[in-house]
Image (cartoon, rainbow, N blue to C red):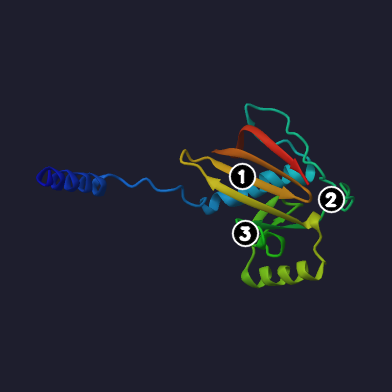
Amino acid sequence: MRRVAQPLILGCLAITLAAPALSAPATPQPDRVAPVIETVLRWAIEGQDLPADPPKASPALPHRSCGGRLDPEHLPETVYVSWQLSAEAQHAVCNWKYDVASHRASPLAPADAAEVTQRISAGTIGPHERAFFHVVPQRDGRLAVTAGYCWGSAAGTFAFRGDGPVLIGELAIHGY
């Protein structure tokens, strides 16, 4: 039995070492972060339909008005974004910003992020000026996204096409 077991174990070890490793999906490529933020926040803040395959009208995000703080005629200049931060940090720290007028997202410099954290702590940045995103890359290149704005959140899977992220399948909506 021992003579059979050693070659069998060595054979299994050789196959294991020679086989390509199945790794977990990597974090999203940096060039995909901004388009996801831009697409989802245009929907959440302005009510724009999400690009979808197949095309369909997007459901409204519940509590989009942020308890009356979001005036559609006077949108915030900037929405600060917690991208991939822990549940605790997403309420106090932001690492991206979204310029509402230009519909552009960009990372915050460390000094700017520290200043935003102080403003959140002081209460001068309200819920209509903050959003959070949690993403899980899929093996097929798609991105499972959960995003929150005010007291609503949505989860869906996005594929990347030439013109940006496209919702594939259904969007799960939650209100708080």
Q: Is label 1 in contact with label 2 (beta carbons under 8 Å)? A: no
Q: Quadrant of residue 96?
A: bottom right
Pair 1/3: label in front: 3
Marked residue nearer the N-terminal end (1 or 2): 2
**Residue 157, horizontal then vertical, whole percent:** 59, 38
Q: Residue at x 75, y 50 (%)?
A: 149
Q: Residue beneath label 3, please? A: 86
**Residue 152, horizontal then vertical, whole percent:** 76, 46
Q: Is label 1 in contact with label 3 (beta carbons under 8 Å)? A: no
Taking depth in this image into account, of 156 and 165 the one nearest to the observer is 156
**Residue 119, horizontal then vertical, whole percent:** 77, 69
Q: Residue at x 67, y 44 (%)?
A: 39
Marked residue nearer the N-terminal end (2 or 3): 2
Which type of secondary structure does the marked residue at label 1 adopt? strand
Labelled disc at residue 42 = none
Q: Residue beneath label 1, please? A: 145
How many angstroms separate mark 1 from mark 3 (CA)? 15 Å
Which type of secondary structure does the marked residue at label 2 adopt? loop
Count up the numbered dots.
3
Q: Is label 2 in contact with label 3 (beta carbons under 8 Å)? A: no
Q: Is residue 3 above or below residue 113?
A: above
- Left or right of 21: which side holds 26? right
| Residue type marked 3 | Ser
Labelled disc at residue 66 = 2
Asked whether the viewer can see residue 77, the reply is no
**Residue 146, horizontal then vertical, whole percent:** 64, 46
Q: Residues within 10 Å of mark 1 (few under 14, many from 20)?
A: some
| Residue type marked 2 | Cys
